[in-house]
């Protein structure tokens, strides 16, 4: 399928940037899927995921949470992110969340490479402290797709997020009363005060080997049930964190295939 793809500035004074993909030959507005990034930003993989939803008949929009006033800071350019991602992929999975072990591995690199990766790492992981700003941007992104974007104006909007974006998809469900549906791929569960405000169905996918995230699911499910919210979850035994990302060694074709099929059916039911 031929797709129309473009980067769009939006929000007050065009302060935000996002990647839009839609079927080339469709002129009428389509239901919108917000594709919420991993911690790496709107990289080639996330753009490819957005393209998949566009090929399925949606206007897919991926807000770039790393852009500031429409531009990435130097440590967060595609090239710098790719270098950092390659470094992280060279490490054992258990080191990812061990800052001391990461620094030790960096110290073995050539000085310039080590300094650049360290700078990028600080800004990537430092982004977790900017969560309030990320939530503000994804809420504005949903509003933009419903009200302003010609590719989806007047149609329903749903969200799907991965890792960082998975947590944001849940946050969006509790901060946008008009959201039609939210899908979480291995993202952190929202706090009780957010759960109380969720007004749409939520679907979650998790890896059985991803204890840090997946161990939150039973409590999340119980809280959603207690609050009278609709939540369905699937845990893939043997799958790791980021099992959907086919650019990483954690990729699981079986889990990704099943989750994507269920995601498309969820959006068919709630966005059409």
Image (cartoon, helix red, strand yellow):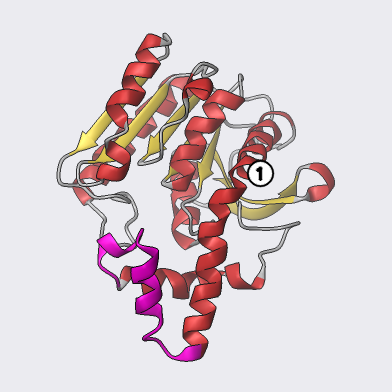
The percent coordinates of residue 263 (x first, y second) are: 36, 33
The percent coordinates of residue 2 (x first, y second) are: 51, 52
Residue farthest to the front, as pictured: 100
Image check: 197 left or right of 221? right
The percent coordinates of residue 231 (x first, y second) are: 36, 20
Q: Residue at x 39, y 17 (%)?
A: 224
Residue 248 sits in which quadrant? bottom left
How many numbered marks have been drawn onto this rendered protein structure?
Answer: 1
Instruction: For residue 2, say whether it is visible.
Output: yes
Residue farthest to the right, as pictured: 13
Q: Residue at x 32, y 57 (%)?
A: 246
In this picture, which residue range is highlighted in magenta? 91-111
Q: Residue at x 33, y 51 (%)?
A: 242
115 up-or-down from 219: above or below: below
Crowd around label 1: few <14 · some 14–19 · many ≥20 (10 Å): few
Q: Nearer the viewer, residue 38 or 223?
A: 223
120 up-or-down from 225: above or below: below
Residue 123 sits in which quadrant? bottom right
78 up-or-down from 211: above or below: below
Residue 219 sits in which quadrant? top left
Instruction: For residue 57, say whether it is visible.
Output: no
Q: Nearer the viewer, residue 67 or 25?
A: 67
Confirm whether the magenta stretch covers residue 113. no
Element type where label 1 sits in the image? helix
Residue linked to disc 1: 133
The percent coordinates of residue 184 (x first, y second) are: 40, 35
């Amino acid at each position: 399928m031929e797709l129309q793809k473009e980067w769009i500035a939006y929000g007050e004074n065009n302060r935000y940037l996002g990647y839009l993909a839609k079927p080339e030959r469709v002129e009428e507005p389509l239901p919108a899927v917000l594709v919420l990034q991993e911690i790496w930003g709107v990289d080639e993989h996330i753009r490819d995921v957005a393209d998949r939803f566009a090929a399925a008949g949606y206007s897919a929009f991926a807000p770039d949470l790393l852009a500031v006033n429409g531009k990435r800071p130097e440590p967060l350019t595609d090239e710098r992110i790719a270098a950092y991602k390659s470094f992280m992929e060279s490490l054992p999975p258990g080191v990812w969340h061990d800052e001391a072990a990461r620094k030790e591995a960096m110290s073995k690199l050539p000085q310039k490479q080590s300094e650049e990766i360290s700078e990028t790492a600080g800004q990537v992981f430092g982004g977790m402290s900017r969560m309030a700003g990320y939530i503000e941007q994804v809420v504005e992104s949903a509003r933009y797709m419903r009200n302003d974007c010609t590719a989806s104006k007047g149609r329903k909007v749903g969200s799907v997020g991965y890792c960082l974006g998975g947590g944001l998809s849940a946050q969006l469900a509790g901060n946008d009363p008009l959201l039609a549906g939210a899908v979480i791929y291995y993202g952190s569960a929202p706090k009780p005060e957010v759960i109380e405000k969720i007004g749409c169905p939520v679907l979650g996918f998790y890896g059985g080997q991803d204890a840090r995230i997946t161990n939150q699911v039973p409590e999340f499910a119980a809280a959603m049930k207690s609050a009278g919210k609709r939540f369905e979850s699937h845990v893939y035994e043997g799958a790791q964190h980021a099992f959907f990302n086919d650019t990483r060694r954690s990729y699981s074709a079986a889990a990704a295939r099943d989750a994507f099929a269920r995601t498309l059916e969820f959006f068919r039911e709630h966005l059409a």
